Amino acid sequence: MTSWQTVTVLGSVQQINRMFEKLREMIDTEVSIPPELRASLHATLNKRLYCARERLFKQYGRPSPSELLRVEGEHSTRTDAEPG
């Protein structure tokens, strides 16, 4: 049985991923944004996504990798790599 904290974290991760994916779609479809700015905006989003998830994990604890993969598989983001 999954704890309420894990359920909370996984639900929040899904919401964060959806929000960032919508922002990415807006960046990619807005014709007034030059390509070099798009790359910069995506890099910024990657850093913000990583930081948002880390804050969430610090508050509630990190779910198991298999639980995270299951949630992220349902709604994948462009990248979940740690920012450099």
Image (cartoon, rainbow, N blue to C red):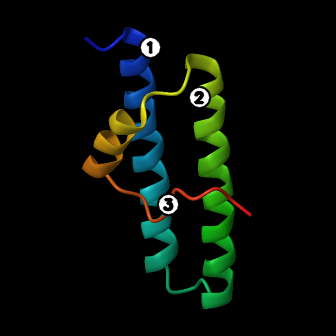
CB atoms of marks 2 and 1 within 8 Å: no
Circle 1 is placed at which residue position? 5
In the image, 31: left or right of 39? left
Q: Compared with residue 42, is residue 62 higher up or lower down, i.e. above or below?
A: above
Q: Position of residue 29 (x, y in %)?
A: 43, 78
Q: Nearer the viewer, residue 73 or 20?
A: 73
Separation of residues labelled 1 and 3 (CA atoms): 27 Å
Circle 2 is placed at which residue position? 56
Q: Position of residue 65 (x, y in %)?
A: 42, 38
Instruction: Indicate the quadrant where residue 66 lies.
Output: top left
Which of label 1 and label 3 is nearer to you?
Answer: 1
> Residue farthest to the right?
84
Q: Secondary structure at mark 1?
A: helix
Q: Amino acid at mark 1?
A: Gln
Q: Compared with residue 84, is residue 15 higher up or lower down, i.e. above or below?
A: above
Separation of residues labelled 2 and 1 (CA atoms): 11 Å
Residue drawn where x is 74% and y is 64% of the image = 84
Residue drawn where x is 62% and y is 48% of the image = 50
